[in-house]
Amino acid sequence: MRPIYGIALTLLLAAPLSAPAFAVEPEAPQALISRTDAIRIAVQTRLAEKFTATTELKKDEKGALVEYYSVPEQKLLWVDETGLTDRGKAVIAEIEKADDYGLRASDYALPDMTGFNASASDAADKLAAAEIEISHAVLDYAHDARGGRINPSRLTKNLDPTLVLPKQLEVIESISFRSDPAAYLRSFQPQHPQFALLRKKLIELRGGGEDAPEAEKVAVNIPSGPLLKFGVADPQVALLRTRLDVPDGANPELYDEAVLEAVKQFQAEHNTAPDGVVGPGTRRLLNRPHLRNMGSPDQINAILLNMERYRWLPPDQGSFYVTVNIPEFTLRVVKDDEAIHTTRVVVGKPNTPTPVFSNEMKTVVFGPYWNVPNSIKVGEIRPYVRPSGGFFFGGGWNTQIFQRQNLRIKHGGREVDPASVDWNRVDIRSLHLYQPPGPHNVLGKVKFMFPNKHDVYMHDTPQKHLFANQVRAESHGCMRVQNPDQLAAIIMEHDKGWNRARTQSAMDTSYDQHVALGRPVPVYMTYFTLRVNEDGSITNYRDLYGHDSRMSAALLGGRTQFAEHDDQIVTQSIPQRQRTRGGDPFAEMLSNF
């Protein structure tokens, strides 16, 4: 990190040794530093002050600003000696529109330059404070726009997206030379077409949008301007008092408690968050009260949550990728931004959910083995290995489940007869249980592997009837794919140039054939519970795993009481006829994997 260059200014006056022979006009004193340099010095001084970081993010932000402003030739970004520059005003205006992008404008502290006097003795210090405040807001906005407001994995281990958060120094250095800094800030917002539709619907539900009806005439119109919040003094507060019928009080331009309560009440009545901050969204409602019922808080919150999930995806998903939307039970193959293949999938049960994450598909396995995971060994196989015969007759163990379903055991690399195991003394987790390839293998004819810490993948299944169900949450976390031969053909043609006949032959005749992909295919496991269609209508999907509740509590301050266990959240959403019933324990296991 570059050091901050302190500037010491010393004025030396020398008295004349003798009186001059004739009168000399005294010269005007020369300015030692420019006013711009004075602002820069004030910025450096402020940044050099002791700072206690409340978070790692704030520590990184401070470091980035110190490094940027410590370089003497770096220009000021948002102010000059007269006040805010056009760049500064443009960035402030963009940040104040954060609500339209699913963020909160009130989260970003911005300077109030009302009544600024460039000739005042403290002008340089006020401008330095404004410069730093705007720079912090820019860094916070870029961070939040890319999904940094919450850490999803702290809500549950099954929300595990790979966030691509911007580096603060790169942001501040890049924005310094952009001709349109507001457009640069917008570029951190997701560029996915669905995000644009969600944003349009959000603005509409909040009372704006191109198709909104003409505004009713109101007695007082609140023009565009700075954020108005508790403690601010601004001429617009007097307009706000008149608009909301609040008495003037001692200072009509002061945003006091009476104004705060009136604004909160107005916001609550108009289906928006009652935060008491008057930004662009509240201004629209103040000036267009007839739009009060455009959207309910629940509708708006659902859109906000799903907008946030688009921030979890990388800015560039690639030209060819596979994506699964878990609540929709749907897989899509996307090429050049167009879905070229769509099919149904079976996903994890509420108590064994399919995780949200991304990785790369690297291998396709034709005729796969099934290696039984420990959770199934312990929970769904060992309970059914029971003593056979009476205690006094030494009847051994009933291990028919292994023979009936063609399950094999290996230990130390050697095949082990299940009947020879003393199951009272052996931990089943220490044994390698597997099912060889074949017509009854639970993975079917093909498996698509994208190595991940959750140990889930996509595969075929012999349980074809489950694809007819409307709710397909039946597995232990892996995704079973309908028509896997079509998915395999698309992947193999894309990567290897195989024709469909060759792919089908591999599925029909191969025995544990691993085909490594030369170009790994990105795979995105997503969780979108709402979609805006091209005609503006909304399609909702069930919150299978309660992630909406978790995110709402963390992001929107929503309902904090949700079920402790995932299976308590969604069971009522799954029709009774689709829930697992008693019977053959291994048949039950097959239907769940």
Image (tube, grey):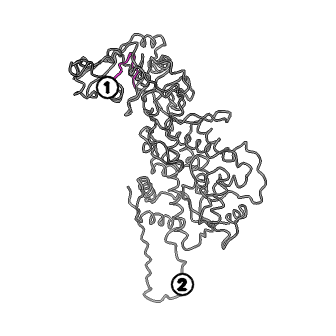
Asked if 116 appears above or below 371 in the picture, the reply is below
- Which residue has dot 1 on it? 382
Which quadrant would residue 387 be assigned to in this image? top left
What residue appears at the point 54 percent right and 33 percent down from the top-left corner?
573
Q: Give the magenta-colored segment's residue range.
A: 362-373
Q: Earlier in the sequence, mark 1 or mark 2?
A: 2
- Magenta stretch: residue 151 in it? no
For label 2, the crowd category at 10 Å Cα-Cα, with few meaning under 14, some 14 to 19 and many 20 or more, is few
Residue annotated with mark 2: 24
Q: Residue at x 45, y 17 (%)?
A: 462
Question: Residue most toward the right?
Answer: 217
441 is higher (above) or lower (below) than 97: above
- Residue lying at 54% horizontally and 65% vertically, measured from the top left: 127
Front label number (1 vs 2): 1
Mark 1, other Cα within 10 Å: few <14 / some 14–19 / many ≥20: some
Q: In this view, does 412 lie to the left or right of 508?
A: left
The quadrant of the picture occupied by the N terminus is bottom left
Is residue 7 or residue 564 the one in the foreground?
Answer: 564
Judging depth in this view, the residue of 514 and 89 nearest the camera is 514
Residue 33 place in picture, x, y as percent: 50, 69
